[in-house]
Amino acid sequence: MGDSQRRSDAGFRAKNLAWMQASIGLIGFAAVLELAPQLGLVSPRYLPPFSVIAAALANELQQANFWAALAFTMRSWAIGLTISVLAGASLGILIGSSAWLQAVTRSTIEFLRPIPSVALIPVAILLFGTTLQSNLVLVIYASFWQVLVQVLSGVQDVDPVARETAQSYRFGHWALIRHVIWPTTLPYLMTGIRLAASVALILAITAELTIGTPGLGRELSLAQSGGAVAVMYAYLIVMGLIGVLVNVAARGLERSIMPWHPSLRSEQPV
Amino acid sequence: MKGGQTLRQAGLALGLPAALLATWWIASSGSANFYFPPLQTIAQTFVEVWVSPRLLDDVVPSLARLAAGYFGAVVLGLLIGIPIGLSRALRNTLEPVLEFLRAIPPPALVPILILFAGIGDTMKTLVIVSGCIWPVLLNTVEGVRGRDEVLEDVTRCYRIRGFARLWHFVIPSASPQMFTGLRQALSIGIILMVISEMFAASNGLGFAIIQFERSFAVAEMWTGIIMLGLIGIGLAQVFRLVERRMLAWYHGLRQSQRAGG
């Protein structure tokens, strides 16, 4: 008992140390951002001191159009991600559960996946202009493949013995999917969702920057054309924070849906 | 028998793409829709547009900037990532900052980098570096951190230190994960290559495509998109060949482990 007590003490201390180091890192980062322009290492016209950026950010937070832009970006993110996850998961399971479909579609998937989604920007501009649909075209094309590819490798990972056992017990098609394929695929699907969630955010903001759909990305390029450098950095910070939140939320979802899964899978099996 | 099998495989691989292309060809053949010209027109325009000096004027500069930015990011990512992976204190200190920097969408850095580097090749290369470095860096950190503990003890017992330890133990054991990062970085690099040219450029693929779109040269625009797709696919293929060569030992190991287990 004394031993376990000591061990948890040590664990507690290690955790404390990690927290301390993390805060040192963050404070140091802010200090560098503050001091580099103050000391003249970088021109404050290009990189304003951190305090100036923070003030600009605080000011933005009081503007109605900031919140409207944020809402627009997050809406296209959420809609696009939902559509790609539903489409990717159902198509992945459908294709994965038949060897023939897998063989037929493999080359097409390999061919379409590396096409960069930004290639679709001009098509989106011509067809949809600066509307939500333009954002969705890019978001869905980019995040769909992340989900599909993960689900496909998940279905391939199904234990052949389990599959054959289910078949000898005359599991129907649906029962097979529900009780054998789905549990194996779920961890892969979650990895796919996590990857897709950050890709979707990147593409939503990219679309706003290049096409001019009314979200955070357009606010950034408006700040650029107005020469409001501190505001540009404020928007970068907001985008970074949203990105971190999306990652944390996706990991939390993973942990709460699959508490039974021993490890959080690495993103390796692509 | 063998010939029949190869034929069957070729049929499976080519069947669906051929069917899709044929559908596109037939469905668009009489198309009067301005935005979706007949595939036949696009194919003819493709030859006109890209089998020309434009290949040298637009595609080559794009690829050169991509190569410069990508390799710059790889070198930086490895140089910074290996020490971070080796030291727990360094990792704990830098992790939140790196997580934050990685989460910033790389295209959003374009306006900032224009401030620092203008709109020339330097800016475009920097944009590619700043986006590609994160997957390389973070995967290197993860790969180095996850090295085998038993082998670590072995190197210590044999007093393998310094460069020899790095070269014969740390880098090989991290390399599968490093390659995951290199692959992610490649697709990000292609995206950034296009984006940086859409903002401000006088040549390059992204510039050409946007130019076609602005002048409503729709067939030309489609050929640009197809060209971009072909480049994406080609680079992914090259990457796969390189990876298979350099990680042959690893794939062999996995296969024998699977067969044994």
Image: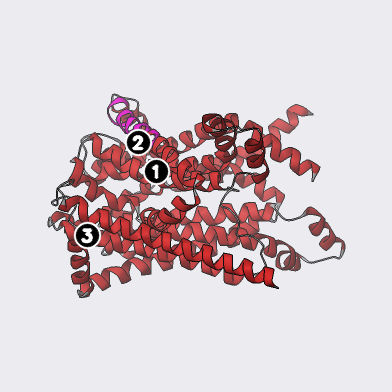
Q: Chain of mark 1?
A: B
Q: Residue at 60% across / 56% down in the picture?
A: A265
Q: Is residue B216 visible?
A: no
Over which residues does the magenta segment extend?
B56-71
What residue is shown with label 3? A50
Q: Position of residue B239 (x, y in %)?
A: 51, 34
Q: Are marks 3 and 1 on the same chain?
A: no
Q: Which mark is residue B132?
A: 1
Residue that label 2 marks: B69
Q: Are the numbered discs 2 and 1 placed on the same chain, yes or no?
A: yes
Residue type at mark 2: give it.
Gly
Q: Residue at x 18, y 41 (%)?
A: B118
Viewed as shown, does residue B86 lie left or right of A56?
A: right
Lower position in the chain sequence, tag 2 or tag 1 = 2
Q: Is residue B12 above or below residue A199?
A: above
Q: CA distance from mark 3 to mark 2?
A: 28 Å
Q: Main secondary structure of the magenta part?
A: helix
Q: Dividing the picture into quarters, in which one does residue A237 lie?
A: bottom left
Q: Amino acid at mark 3?
A: Phe
Quadrant into which the N terminus of chain B falls = top right
Q: Chain of mark 3?
A: A
**Front position in the image: A189 or B203:** A189
Nearer the observer: mark 3 or 1; the answer is 3
**Type of the residue with mark 1:** Cys
